[in-house]
Amino acid sequence: MNVIEEHESEVRSYCRSWPTTFDRAVGSVMWNTDGERYIDFFAGAGALNYGHNDPDLKKALMDYLAGDGVVHSLDMFTKAKADFLRTFDEVVLTPRGLDYKVQFPGPTGTNAVEAALKLARKVKGREQIVSFTNAFHGMTLGSLAVTGNSMKRGGAGIPLAHTTPMPFCNYMEEGSGLTYFESLLADSGSGLDLPAAVIVETVQGEGGINVASYEWLRRLSELCRDNDILLIIDDIQMGCGRTGPFFSFEPAGITPDIVTLSKSISGYGFPMALTLLRPELDVWEPGEHNGTFRGHNPAFITGAAGLRKYWSDDVLTTEVEAKTKLIEGAMLSIVSTTPGTDTRGRGFAQGLVFEDPDKASAVVKACFERHLLLETSGPESEVVKAMPALTITEAELNEGLDILAASVAEVMGTGADVDVPTDEAVTS
Ligand code: PLP
């Protein structure tokens, strides 16, 4: 038993799937304390879209720290915050014709969701929030109440109230879930109280890489507008380019009332979260939603540097679109030779679905043995989830995909193996 197993709570989880001690990381490669190299298809569960220790972001951070830049400041005015907000406006919002006020709700994704739900309830003066089957929005009580997973909900220890789940896209026969929701809203005898807001992910990352079609998102947006319901898009995992564009909802042509962002918004894996709100929804009283760690200056520095480096043009989005074809091709090739599997996803969030959930876990374990890191998702952990950094090189991507194919072949007994990569195989 190592010191972490001895002292850290039983609640720890990722280290159980990957029982090695990591030490260094650059780009899409991590090394353990023995200097062994691992390809990272996990990317901090979406917090490392630009990979580990991006050199330009690191330099901006080191310069800031070396100059004794303010690190902690609650929500005081700081130069770093001003630069982040200016950059976010100039690089992200204005070019997309979006007008949002920015709230720094606390450092993690669930803080952004809690703020969004509170604000929606305050604006509309209603309690109900509609969420979707297999949604995941975080671990605090408000976010858990709009999360589907029964194991996670069970951890609350109290009733999770004032929310109603509706069928996500393709949960039922195509389109019928929204028709059901629409009927309930139209029927004064349905028992559904008019919700303040609907909260939805465009692709459910934790829920099993379930993809909402753009048509479905448009219909949902119209339904919200026609019924005076606020639309909250939770872009915590699928935003910051995970599916290609900066915001995952852009291709649907919709404008949510509230957007939550976190994970990769700091660009460097620092805790940081944003709740974006249409200006007319900004009815907060000063300090009404508070917190000690709202806007961490080092995260503003790396966040702004990341936006300038990766979002001042469309190079990253174009590269993601091109490399998505590689991932999709590899997934389809695995599925075509492996009965009992299927694939789905969008951009750099791709899933390999197993009829037998035990096989998905076995594949993740076999991948780890070959030095590839990825995790499972879905209600039964039946989906192997490939989420590489958007900046991964083609060589690293192919290396990881080969390992995935070989691991599936071993677990399902369908094909040949590949060797564990050596340090020389690909440089970071
Ligand atoms: N919303 C979505 C869509 C997420 O994927 C997650 C985390 O995976 C969260 C919210 C919660 O974020 P955090 O774990 O930072 O609280």
Image: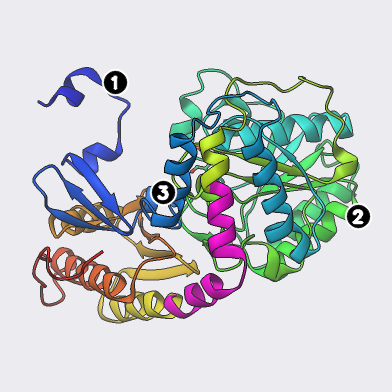
Q: Amino acid at mark 3?
A: Lys
Contact? badges 3 and 1 (CB < 8 Å) = no
Q: Residue at x 54, y 75 (%)?
A: 315
Sequence order check: which comes first, mark 3 or mark 1? 1
Q: Residue at x 66, y 37 (%)?
A: 79
Q: Position of residue 111 (x, y in %)?
A: 60, 31
Say above or below: 24 vs 246.
above
Q: Amino acid at mark 2?
A: Asp
Residue at mark 1:
9
Out of 428 and 377, give the one closest to the viewer: 428
**In the figure, is residue 250 to the left or right of 424?**
right
Q: Amino acid at mark 1?
A: Ser
Residue at mark 3:
58
Out of 383 and 347, give the one closest to the viewer: 347
Q: Position of residue 362 (x, y in %)?
A: 20, 54
Numbered disc total: 3
Q: Residue at x 64, y 68 (%)?
A: 213
- Give the magenta-colored segment's residue range: 303-323
**Residue 131 visible in the current orientation:** no
Quadrant into which the N terminus falls = top left
Characterize the local packing of mark 1: few (<14), some (14-19) or many (20 or more) Cα atoms within 10 angstroms.
few
Say above or below: 402 vs 349.
below
- Indicate yes or no whether the magenta region holds residue 308: yes
Residue at mark 2:
226
Contact? badges 2 and 1 (CB < 8 Å) = no
How far is mark 2 from mark 1, CA to CA? Answer: 48 Å
Q: Nearer the viewer, mark 3 or mark 1?
A: 3
Q: Tell me the chief SS of the magenta region.
A: helix
Sequence order check: which comes first, mark 3 or mark 2? 3
